[in-house]
Image (cartoon, rainbow, N blue to C red):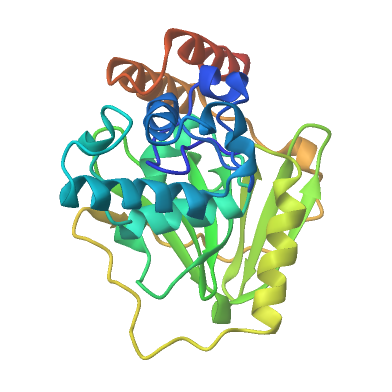
Amino acid sequence: MNTICALCGTPLTSTDMLVGKNKLADGGYLCAECFNKAITINRDLANNLHQFYFAEITGMFLKSKIDASQNPGSSPYSGASNYEYDAPTRLDEIKDQIVSLKARLSVLANEEVNELDKVLDQNERLIAIAECINLHNKREGIIFSTQWRVIFMDKKFLGGMVKNEYTHKDITSLDQVENLLYSVLRVNTRGGTVEFKLHNKSDGRTFCDTVNGQIREPERPSHQQATQPQSFFQNVPSPAPQSISSQSASNTPKSSSEDIFEQLEKLGKLRQMGVLSEEEFSIQKAKLLERL
């Protein structure tokens, strides 16, 4: 299920999802603010938004801005001329890719998602993404793949970034082991194997199939090289070589108490910033406490 507004990219609240009227024909959702702006431009959208596609909605906003600039005050709907339509940014494009992948990311992944435009090259596109725990360093973040590389990323609470990168040419294969509640994704490289515990069980098979298919039929990179990490990135070396164990995923170590408390601290900050409502904060907090 989509977790961000298709138009402005802000996280959706539980109210946005429950209303139902905010859903677009191509599966995306509008936040309450964008929905109100849309029906200000076209009142028919109040009951028929589900019949319109994202491209049609953005076209309406753009046309409204052009009409208002050419004929100030001529719009039949008050407030339409006050809305400023901004051209999509690189981060907007990346978030659209996440929506198209139907990724199931929680609000805890927002900080990592908002840094993706600093990590990905202009010509890179996302082909798979999931929320996970790196079982090597016990960091919680997101793992994603482009057409050229697989990256694990965790945005530290006090700034900086933990990032592990594995190019497709160094990866021999990906496989996954499913448990009743989760799956463990294994990235097998020439130097060893690193494991990631995925929060959503079904993400493992999808991630493996997509990336293994890309590795078998790689897309040739353009002449432009991948963007170098920013100075505040902290590159963490890959784990020491290890054999692929047949150990069951049920023996995967649980998150340490320090990791849980760090995530609780991050949740508190998101609530203070207004990103999370009290209800959303309580739900996510309960999930974290269950893992202690």
Question: Relative to residue 204, is residue 281 drawn left or right?
Answer: left
Q: Residue at left 41%, top 58%?
A: 93
**Residue 50 drawn at (x, y percent):** 63, 37
Quadrant, the N terminus: top right
Of 172 and 14, nearer the camera is 14
Instruction: Confirm whether residue 235 shows in the render.
Output: no
Question: Relative to residue 203, is residue 165 drawn left or right?
Answer: left
**Residue 72 drawn at (x, y percent):** 16, 41
**Residue 117 drawn at (x, y percent):** 33, 58
| Residue 242, above or below 50 | below
| Residue 234, above or below 280 | below
Q: Residue at left 30%, top 72%?
A: 227
Q: Residue at left 50%, top 15%?
A: 280
Instruction: Confirm whether residue 158 shows in the render.
Output: yes
Question: Relative to residue 37, is residue 146 drawn left or right?
Answer: right
Q: Residue at left 61%, top 67%?
A: 192
Q: Which quadrant of the structure image shows residue 79?
A: top left
**Residue 152 drawn at (x, y percent):** 48, 54
